[in-house]
Image (cartoon, rainbow, N blue to C red):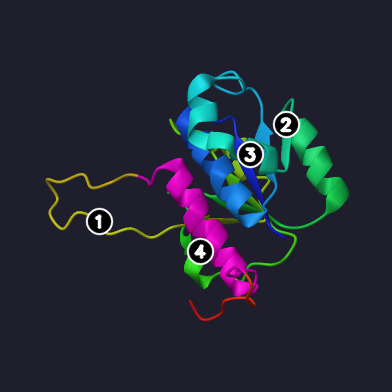
Amino acid sequence: MPQIVLYQPEIPPNTGNVARTCAATGTPLHLVEPLGFSIDDRQLKRAGLDYWPLVPLQRHASWTAFADHREALGGQLIAFSSHARQSYLDWRFGPDDWLLFGRESDGLPSEVLGCADVALTIPMARAARADRCGVRSLNLSVAVAVALFESLRQQDLLTLPGSQAITGI
């Protein structure tokens, strides 16, 4: 089962929405501190609704603490960055992957990005004219959902209630 890692998230509703996605898929969520909010934040709880008890949640006091934890468990660390050159669509996800996402304001710092086994991006349409800047990145919770569901799809881990895994989405 893949695991989601949020590096120093800053916006409570984004983290709450990610937690809701993790609850819906049974995916562990790791929060690397410092957080830009209190874990008891009202907006965080509101975005996660009453699903927080369903989220396998772990907090890590620092990047080093998380890195030690991941190393002990194994698996590939897959960073997502709008600056990466390889599309997530060209990657074969594995069962022990750690899907790493950076801060909303500035993504992953280079020293953290350098620890990843691979950096992937989610392709987006770019502005057709030079005078339009286009969209720089997706919302954190959207990016997590896109990457997580592709990983789950590739591994035949998506199911409907009372059915077998969904394949070929």
Residue found 69% across the figure and 38% down from its top: 53
Query: Disc 2 vs disc 3: Cβ atoms closer than 8 Å?
Result: no
* SS class, disc 3: helix
Residue 141 placement (x, y as % from top left)? 47, 44
Which contiguous range is marked in magenta? 137-161
Q: Is residue 26 above or below residue 45?
A: below
Q: Which residue is mark 2?
A: 59
Mark 2 Cα-neighbour bin, 10 Å: few <14, some 14–19, many ≥20: some
On residue 112, the disc is 3
Q: Is residue 43 above or below residue 149?
A: above
Mark 1 Cα-neighbour bin, 10 Å: few <14, some 14–19, many ≥20: few
Amino acid carrying mark 2 in the image: Arg
On residue 137, the disc is none
Sequence-wise first label, 2 or 3: 2
Magenta segment, prevailing SS (helix, strand or loop): helix
| Image quadrant containing the N terminus | bottom right
Q: Nearer the viewer, residue 49 or 94?
A: 49
In 3D space, how far apart are the residues under numbered discs 3 and 1 (Cα atoms)? 27 Å
Q: Which residue is mark 4?
A: 88
Amino acid carrying mark 1 in the image: Arg
